[in-house]
Amino acid sequence: KQEVTQIPAALSVPEGENLVLNCSFTDSAIYNLQWFRQDPGKGLTSLLLIQSSQREQTSGRLNASLDKSSGRSTLYIAASQPGDSATYLCAHTGGGNKLTFGTGTQLKVEL
Amino acid sequence: DTEVTQTPKHLVMGMTNKKSLKCEQHMGHRAMYWYKQKAKKPPELMFVYSYEKLSINESVPSRFSPECPNSSLLNLHLHALQPEDSALYLCASSQEGYGFRPPGMDTQYFGPGTRLTVL
């Protein structure tokens, strides 16, 4: 069974801090790696998608990197804000279009 | 319109009730998905429909019965559920039919979910 692990499980930081969320996966044959945001009791919002041939993607204050050889991806959030508080999930696509989700990191950005 | 809608937002039902969850998208997507998400856990795939036909059933108990009446609509019929079935049920859609585009090229768009409580 393919596993996707996210560390840390929970993180609390003061506003303005730069932070890194980690995602590790065991499947070496992934086609892409995606980062989602989920607010409590809500659906998932796609943040960034990195194809397997790419190394990183950027959107605003977010930067995601992918290292297939080591089975790792990171999500970098610059100048964090209270509105960034949410659960962040990474997920990769293996066979077909099946998403395998990570365990999630619950982020709280405090004033 | 890049929205997937789900109704109802919340549902409370008894173990003998029959209810249905509804998912709708008007993006012309040909694949639709049902996921189940327990508290503090990642979503788990339940069903995939491609071109209105069931492509994947992840060994889901028969008390969950999916239906795809047309390309824009996906239902999940619920009957004789157990309290452990209480969860957030998420619907998603993607542009191409399942498996038609090279893997990883199709983004899934998620709805806001239905919070189901089984008493």
Image (cartoon, helix red, strand yellow):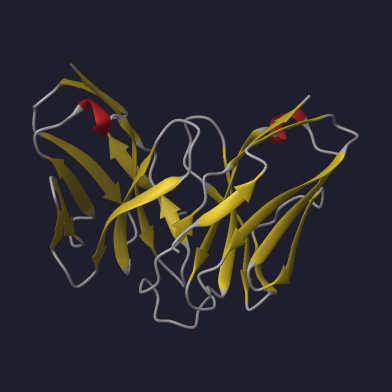
Image-quadrant location for residue A9: top left
Query: As displayed, is residue A47 above or below residue B30?
Result: above
List x then y, in percent, for residue A50: 23, 63
Which residue is painted at 38% across and 45% down in the image?
A: A102
Query: As displayed, is residue A102 above or below residue B54?
Result: above
Residue A28 visible somewhere in the drawing: no
List x then y, in percent, for residue B115: 62, 35
Which residue is painted at 48% across and 38% down in the image?
A: A42
Q: Nearer the viewer, residue A27 or A63?
A: A63
Residue A72 visible somewhere in the drawing: yes
List x then y, in percent, for residue A8: 26, 30
Q: Is residue A67 left or right of residue B101?
A: left
Q: Is residue A41 left or right of residue B88?
A: left
Q: Is residue A95 left or right of residue A47?
A: right
Quadrant (top left/top right/bottom left/bottom right) for the C terminus of chain A: top left
Q: Nearer the viewer, residue B86 or A103?
A: B86
List x then y, in percent, for residue B97: 54, 78
Query: As displayed, is residue A88 above or below residue B110?
Result: above
Which residue is painted at 50% across and 33% down in the image?
A: A41
Q: Nearer the viewer, residue A31 or B95?
A: B95
Q: Is residue B102 left or right of residue B34?
A: left
**How many numbered circles are shown?**
0
Q: Residue furthest front?
A: B1
Q: Nearer the viewer, residue A72 or B45?
A: B45
